[in-house]
Image (spheres, helix red, strand yellow):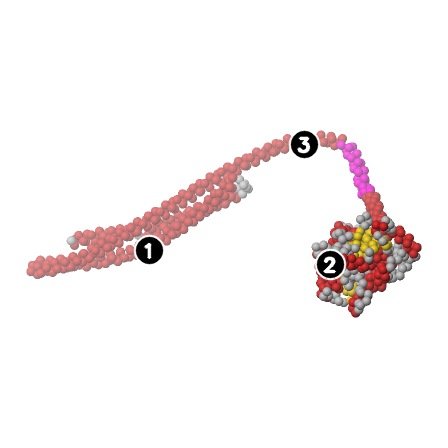
């Protein structure tokens, strides 16, 4: 057994030695160094390739945009790619290097341990062999001494078991070591495999590089070939061009000869051309002067033409203005012929307020053939009156307005207009002037008409319309649109010396629409209402004035016009009981009587063209002075109640009307100086009709057959009566 063991040990030692030599780190290191060297070599190769490439590039830098350059670029790209790959391979190689290093380290460790265990084993062996020798010696000595030997054998046997045990241990250790060696072998094998792999990749890389090199070479070859081709082409082209040039040159020489001969003939032509050119130059030099001359002439002609047009325009404008003036003059003449003071009568219908019975019976009749005649039954007698126009109870507000609208529009042309409503309280003055909301009177309709007219003329004229509302009560003028309606206003002469009158502080509202007018009227009414408890009572005792001013500008001529429309709802003309009235009622009556008489006087004086017109006798006439005089137009609307109980007042009103109207316009009438008359005086006349009274015609009956005598007969009467 010992022999066997020894043999085995020897084997193992040999094996270990072999392994040691096999596993020697030097091999791997050598391999690595080899790889590194190879790598280095490859790098150098690559560098030389790059250098060559560079050189090639330089050589072919001239050949721009040729296929080869593109090819080259492609190749370079690929080269860069390959370089990248090489770089990667290098990285991998270094990784592998690292791994090999690690493994070598581990191997060294294992070797060390192996050496240790071998040393141990050698030691053990030594020990065992020593003991064996001892044992053999003892066995020999024991053989010599059999007794002793038996004992010794026994001990040896005993000791042999111990040796056996130690052998077992050694075997197990050996086993362990063998296992270790197996493991190391495994590791070695793996490393070898890895090495093979990296060798393979290196070989691949080498092959790739070879491939690229060959490609490069190929490209280079192609490039060279191409260059050669191009060189050939160039040479060929040069040769061709040279040949062509020679041919052309020959032709040019021939031409030159022809041209030379031509030149000889052209010289005289050139001479004539030069002459022409010189003369043209002269002309061109003179041209601006000629042009200036022509321009001057043209300008002068145009200027003259413009001047002519201007003068024609001026002439036309002058004529237009003259025509305008003529028109105004004609209009004035027409108005003068027609009489610019007109008197209308309006009979209101019988209302519920008139009551019933004989007192409320109708006493007014009309002439079916003449709308200027009105008959009144008074105390059993029929009295007839002739006015400019009479409206029956059936006449509508529109009918009335129809007759006055020409008057109203004339204020747009710059005329002053006055429309008065005259008559006893309850005769319909307010109805005619203001009307009802659903059936408005002259005031609202007039303003509406003015608006539409102004709009119609808007392309040629610019107009502004302003409105003032005032009242005269007990000879005091009040502004109903003002902040202080109770304040009494004065009428003053304009300080500019024009002789015009004005009312300082009288409010003027500019109106642009019907809504504006309504607002103004409402405001005026509210001022009247807040101040007085019994509106009806008060309104019948005061004159209400609506003053509309129309200012116009003619865009074409710059002509400015101002027209005033005065719409006056007069105080009731009825007489206050002749006796019994006292205090404030008497004062009111006196004031009203005075102002209405003054109005009558003024109108009378105006129609009679008297030198002196007594405007200053009342506030009303003084205020309306410039709207009553000159070429102003006046309309007196005499309101009449048709019922029996009012006949005496009706008679008074109609007499007043006819008297105003019938003043003659001829030279005789102008001389006729009638004194001032009052409504009271009228009254007296009514009771005793006299033939001398110029305007009153009394008929015992309308059917008496006596035809009505018109203006002509009255004129005669007036003349005879003086
Ligand atoms: P005045 O202002 O003269 O005192 P009004 O205008 O107040 O008189 O009229 C008195 C009454 O008669 C009112 O109720 C009014 O509506 C009515 N009236 C007056 N004229 C007419 C007319 N033409 N048609 C219908 N009613 C009228
Ligand atoms: Mg009234």
Prevalent SS, magenta region: helix
In the image, residue 477 lies at what x, y percent? Answer: 79, 64
The residue shown at (75%, 53%) is 397
Which residue extends farthest left?
A: 147
Would you say the residues marked 1 and 3 are in contact, meaning their CB atoms lie under 8 Å apart? no
Residue at the spot of label 3: 252
Mark nearer the N terminus (2 vs 3): 3
Label annotation for residue 39? none
Q: In which quarter of the image is residue 357?
A: bottom right
In the image, residue 323 lies at what x, y percent? Answer: 84, 49
Residue at the spot of label 2: 355
Residue at the spot of label 1: 105
In the image, residue 385 lies at what x, y percent? Answer: 83, 54
Label 3: how many Cα within 10 Å (few below 14, some 14–19, many 20+):
some
Label 2: state its secondary structure: loop
Q: In this view, does 307 lie above or below 655?
A: above
Left or right, 94 with reference to 410: left
In the image, residue 496 lies at what x, y percent? Answer: 84, 62
């Amino acid at each position: 057994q010992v022999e066997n063991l020894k043999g085995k040990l020897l084997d193992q030692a040999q094996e270990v030695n072999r392994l040691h030599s096999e596993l020697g780190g030097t091999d791997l290191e050598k391999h690595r160094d080899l790889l590194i060297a190879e790598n280095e070599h490859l790098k150098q190769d690559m560098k030389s390739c790059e250098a060559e490439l560079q050189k090639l590039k330089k050589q072919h830098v001239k050949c721009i945009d040729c296929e080869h350059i593109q090819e080259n670029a492609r190749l370079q790209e690929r080269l860069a790619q390959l370089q990248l790959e090489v770089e990667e391979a290098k990285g991998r190689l270094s990784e592998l290097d690292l791994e090999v290093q690690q493994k070598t380290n581990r191997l060294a460790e294992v070797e060390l341990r192996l050496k240790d265990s071998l040393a141990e084993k050698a030691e053990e062996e030594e020990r065992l062999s020593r003991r064996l020798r001892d044992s053999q010696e003892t066995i020999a000595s024991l053989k010599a001494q059999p007794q002793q030997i038996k004992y010794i054998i026994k001990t040896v046997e005993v000791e042999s078991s111990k040796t056996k045990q130690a052998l077992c241990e050694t075997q197990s250790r050996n086993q362990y070591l063998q296992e270790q060696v197996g493991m190391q072998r495994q590791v070695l094998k793996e490393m070898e495999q890895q090495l093979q792999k990296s060798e393979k990749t290196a070989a691949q890389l080498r092959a790739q590089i070879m491939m690229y090199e060959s490609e490069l070479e190929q490209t280079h070859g192609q490039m060279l070939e191409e260059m050669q081709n191009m060189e050939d082409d160039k040479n060929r082209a040069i040769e061709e061009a040279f040949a062509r040039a020679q041919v052309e040159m020959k032709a040019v020489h021939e031409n030159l000869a022809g041209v030379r001969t031509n030149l000889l003939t052209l010289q005289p032509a050139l001479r004539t051309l030069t002459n022409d050119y010189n003369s043209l130059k002269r002309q061109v030099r003179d041209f601006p002067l000629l042009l200036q001359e022509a321009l001057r002439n043209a300008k002068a002609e145009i200027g003259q033409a413009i001047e002519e047009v201007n003068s024609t325009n001026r002439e036309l404008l002058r004529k237009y203005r003259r025509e305008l003036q003529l028109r105004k003059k004609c209009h004035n003449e027409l108005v003068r012929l027609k009489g610019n003071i007109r008197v209308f009568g309006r009979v209101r219908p019988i209302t519920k307020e008139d009551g019933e019975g004989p007192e409320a019976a109708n006493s007014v009749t009309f002439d079916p053939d003449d709308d200027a005649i009105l008959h009144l039954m008074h105390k059993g007698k029929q009295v007839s009156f002739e006015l400019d126009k009479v409206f029956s109870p059936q006449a509508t507000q529109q009918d009335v307005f129809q007759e006055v609208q020409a008057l109203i529009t004339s204020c747009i042309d710059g005329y002053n207009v006055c429309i008065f409503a005259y008559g006893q309280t309850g005769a319909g003055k307010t109805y005619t002037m203001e009307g009802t909301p659903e059936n408005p009177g002259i005031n609202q309709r007039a303003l509406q008409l003015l608006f539409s007219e102004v709009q119609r003329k808007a392309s040629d004229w610019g107009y502004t319309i302003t409105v003032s509302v005032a009242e005269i009560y007990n000879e005091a003028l009040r502004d109903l649109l003002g902040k202080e309606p109770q304040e009494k206003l004065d009428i003053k002469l304009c300080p500019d010396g024009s002789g015009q009158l004005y009312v300082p502080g009288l409010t003027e509202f500019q109106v642009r629409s019907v809504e504006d007018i309504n607002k103004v009227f409402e405001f005026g009414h509210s001022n009247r209402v807040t101040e007085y408890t019994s509106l009806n009572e008060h309104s019948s005792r005061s004159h209400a004035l609506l003053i509309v001013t129309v200012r116009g500008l003619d865009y074409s001529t710059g002509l400015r016009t101002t027209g005033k429309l005065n719409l006056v709802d007069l105080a009731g003309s009825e007489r206050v009981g002749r006796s019994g009235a006292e205090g404030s009622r008497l004062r009111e009556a006196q004031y009203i009587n005075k102002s209405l008489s003054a109005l009558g006087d003024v109108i009378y004086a105006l129609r009679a063209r008297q030198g002196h017109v007594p405007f200053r006798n009342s506030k009303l006439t003084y205020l309306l002075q410039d709207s009553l005089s000159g070429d102003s137009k006046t309309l007196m609307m005499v309101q009449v109640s048709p019922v029996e109980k009012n006949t005496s007042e009706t008679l008074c009103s109609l007499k007043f009307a006819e008297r105003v109207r019938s003043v003659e316009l001829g030279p005789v009438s102008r001389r006729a100086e009638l004194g001032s008359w009052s409504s009271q005086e009228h009254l007296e006349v009514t009771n005793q009709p006299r033939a001398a009274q110029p305007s009153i015609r009394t008929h015992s009956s309308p059917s008496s057959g006596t035809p009505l005598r018109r203006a002509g007969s009255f004129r005669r009467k007036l003349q005879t009566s003086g």
